[in-house]
Amino acid sequence: MISAMLKPSLHTWLEKYFAYLKYEKNLAHNSIENYQRQLLVSFNQLDIENWSLFTTSDVRNLLNEARKNGLGSRSIALRLSSIRGFCAFLVQQGQLVQNPATSIQAPKQAKPLPKQLNVDEMHQLLDIQEDDFLAIRDKAMMELMYSCGLRLSELANLNIKSIQPDRQLKVLGKGNKERLLPIGRIASEALTVWLKIRPELTSNEEPALFVSMRKNRIGTRQIAKRMKLWAIRQNLEQSVNPHKLRHSFATHVLESSSDLRAVQELLGHANLSTTQVYTHLNFQHLAHVYDGAHPRAKKSRPS
């Protein structure tokens, strides 16, 4: 259904395009409705007499108007895609010499924030009462990952010699960069219990800190599978994966300390911007931390 607000001279080719989507492209009814909605809203106030006058500036103006109306990056990208498709049809039909929308880039969409477990959920996950080999090993793995904010690959690649004096852990991260991390008290206790029974599962020649029932280094897939299983066993309402434990570590430390740079070091991020993606902090919170920490941001004291 074409909007009455749209100029009559523009109706015809929109009607033809929707028919083209239906009969030649065989799109589903819902898909065609989405195209209609996007295009009709976009073109309602378009002040041209025919489509041959439709320019790149017109496309930019339509998208800017959408932005002013509060549309997010994802919605604007969808609208641009719809306009591009329609313009490609007009080029194909000889109504436009070239597609005015192809030179316009879709807005960058914010990276989705990783989900996290809150502190209570984390306690629920790690409150493992079973005392068989696998339970003891899995508890030690999850406690260590949460305590140190390890990547999955970093956890799997740990060796016995990675454990350093004074409750420290030597980790080889991305780009073969080594970092030394503190091990929390509870994680250290879980690790001690595991190390007592580990010799019963494998030989002294095996360097891996965590081993499978096959007596060799446990793989990343198996670690992820075990964490997912424990989420079910511990009656969590959401699934658990290794990255979620790492993100929960980052969020909880950041909430307690507001020290973004320290969290960057602990996570082994080369750039601070990467660390910000792992947090739920909004810009105002970051600005507040900055104002409270940066010497140049603090209010000058009266002399």
Image (cartoon, rainbow, N blue to C red):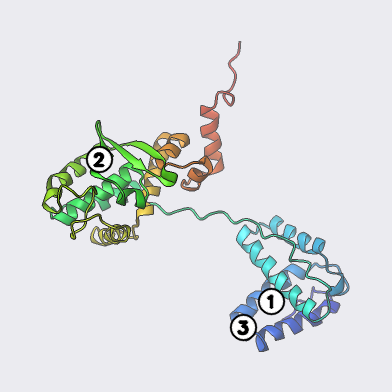
Residue type marked 1 = Gln
Residue annotated with mark 1: 36
Helix, strand or loop at label 1? It is: helix
Residue 245 point in image, percent of width and height: 35, 50
x, y (%) of residue 99? 78, 70
Label 2: which residue?
Answer: 161
Of callouts 2 and 1, the N-terminal one: 1
Label 1 neighbourhood size at 10 Å, few (<14), some (14-19), many (20+)? many
Q: Position of residue 184 (x, y in %)?
A: 28, 37
N-terminal of the pair, mark 2 or mark 3, is: 3
Query: Is residue 245 visible to the viewer in this orientation of the structure?
Result: no
Q: Which mark is residue 296?
A: none
Gap in angstroms between the C-alphas marked 2 and 1: 63 Å
Task: Please state the horizontal and vertical placement of residue 40, each as a whole percent of the image.
Answer: 73, 73
Dot 3 amino acid type: Leu
Residue drawn at x 33%, y 57% is 240
Mark 3, residues whose alpha carbon is within 10 Å: few (<14), some, or many (≥20)? some
- Mark 3 highlights which residue? 27
Q: Amino acid at mark 2?
A: Lys
